[in-house]
Image (cartoon, helix red, strand yellow):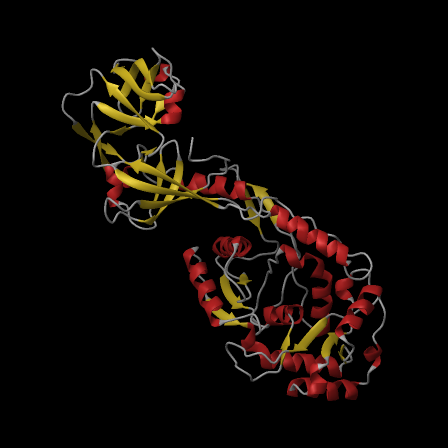
Amino acid sequence: MGIFSGSIEKKKTHSSNLPEIELPNAEVGKVCLMFAPEPNGYLHIGHSKAALLNKYFVDKYKGRLIVRLDDTNPAKESTEFVESLLKDIGSLSIVYDAITYTSDYFPQLMDMAEKLIREGKAYVDHTPVDQMRIERDKGFESKSRNNSVSKNLELWKEMILGSNRGLMCCLRGKLDFQNPNKCLRDPVYYRCNLAHHHRVGFKYKLYPTYDFASPFVDALEGITHVLRSNEYRDRDDQCHMIQEDMGVRKGASTNQNLMQWDKLWTINKKIIDPIFPRHTAVLEEHRILITLVNGPAEPFVRIMPRHKKFKEAGDKCTLYTKNIWIDYADALSISVNDEVTLMDWGNCIIKEIKRNEMDTVVELLGVLHLEGSVKATKLKLTWLPETDELVRLQLVEFDYLITKEKLVKFKKKKGEKTQEEKIQEEKEFLKALNPVTRKDTFALGDSNMRNLISGEIIQLERKGYFRCDIPFVKQSKPIVLFAIPDGRQSNIVQ
């Protein structure tokens, strides 16, 4: 089966406002897709999007998904990255039908390369790298382009051996050295690399480039549609020409996309908000005591749902006491005789605001007004009982590593970028780096949080969503909660 080239179509469904994404000419039961990360690093957000999009189409068309590790650059790849990628793919709940490696096809790829040499569609070039770069940029023909087939085969064998002569060479496709699209200017198919390969050791002295290997392996594995990432969008025509020379059908097109984190987190919030339980916290160093004059003489407990609209979240115990804690920021927004709502309790009228000699609020006096209308109050306050049973929390917020959505890059016009342009790009990059990307805030939480387990997701009401990183061990050691952004710019500290 070959490779189809076409754009993704979007249609509005009748039952939802969300677009239904379709693959052109896709048949149920016959779609085969591949997710092909290079094992030279860890899974990032771009990988995740590509993997989930492949999963979407495989589920939609009841097709097959192949995870292919594109291991063609041994100097940068390792078994550690392979294992990490597969683990993270599993954490996305992606089920695949097979795991393959580009290195599985090294013998066939070498046969194809030699076939193209014999057909005059590829040649071995011994031009120095810097000179070759200039020639490609200016559209100059390489002197090696007119080598005889026998000469190319001779140099090809030197590359296979990894000899001193072979190390000076690379295999290039004979496409169109003057094409306006510089990707078509005789791209490199093979280059020598003497580094140890994490799967085949030192068996090979040369390795295929992604541009050469990908269309060929796609055809061998029966990939029907290829979803290519933004970084390869300018190589579509190149891919098509290589496939024509190989004798396989043309591959897929690209869709450009600048992903935005706030949209991702907003979508994530829609998923977690309906099902994850609610708890309460007040900031440890920014809290104020409210004394309820007519509060309960003795503390009492009510069993409350952890999520009012999702019973499966379970129950929690809420303790009601005469003295309660609220956040300092909430206390500052209250005036004498204001009626406020204490969430999950009822209304309260503030009768007195006590201040110290610095005019700082230190305590509030209030009267419960439980018959008051909750709908009529403007302030809905989260609170905690004054009790030794509260648990200590360490709330951790992570900020962006880079503060700009898109970094400035100079486009090459003639030749390579100038030294001045490179320096300016580096300065822009350094300016965009965020010097502080972590902030820790200490708080007190309700006693039910003793039962949180590592990895559990909760909402601290009016503060945000969190994932439990370190659960309760002992009172002197805080529970560590990692903040989950929800698409809005907000801070825990008020």
Q: Is 336 left, or right, of 159 in this rendering?
A: left
Residue lying farthest front?
357
Residue 293 visible somewhere in the drawing: yes
Task: Say which residue appears at 26% left-offset and 34% top-offset.
Answer: 305
Q: Position of residue 494 (x, y in %)?
A: 43, 30
Query: Residue 246: where, in percent of width, then height?
Result: 69, 74
Q: Is residue 128 above or below residue 57?
A: below
The residue closer to the viewer here, 471 or 16, is 471
The quarter holding residue 291 reads top left
Q: Quadrant of the N terminus?
A: bottom right
Q: Residue at x 78, y 80 (%)?
A: 120
Q: Position of residue 292 (x, y in %)?
A: 24, 18
Let me know if residue 257 appears in the view. no
Residue 213, image x, y percentages: 63, 72
Instruction: Return the residue nearer the eye: 265 or 68.
Output: 265
Please indicate whether residue 67 sits to the left or right of residue 108 in the image: left
78 sits left or right of 393 in the view = right
Quadrant in the picture for residue 346 = top left
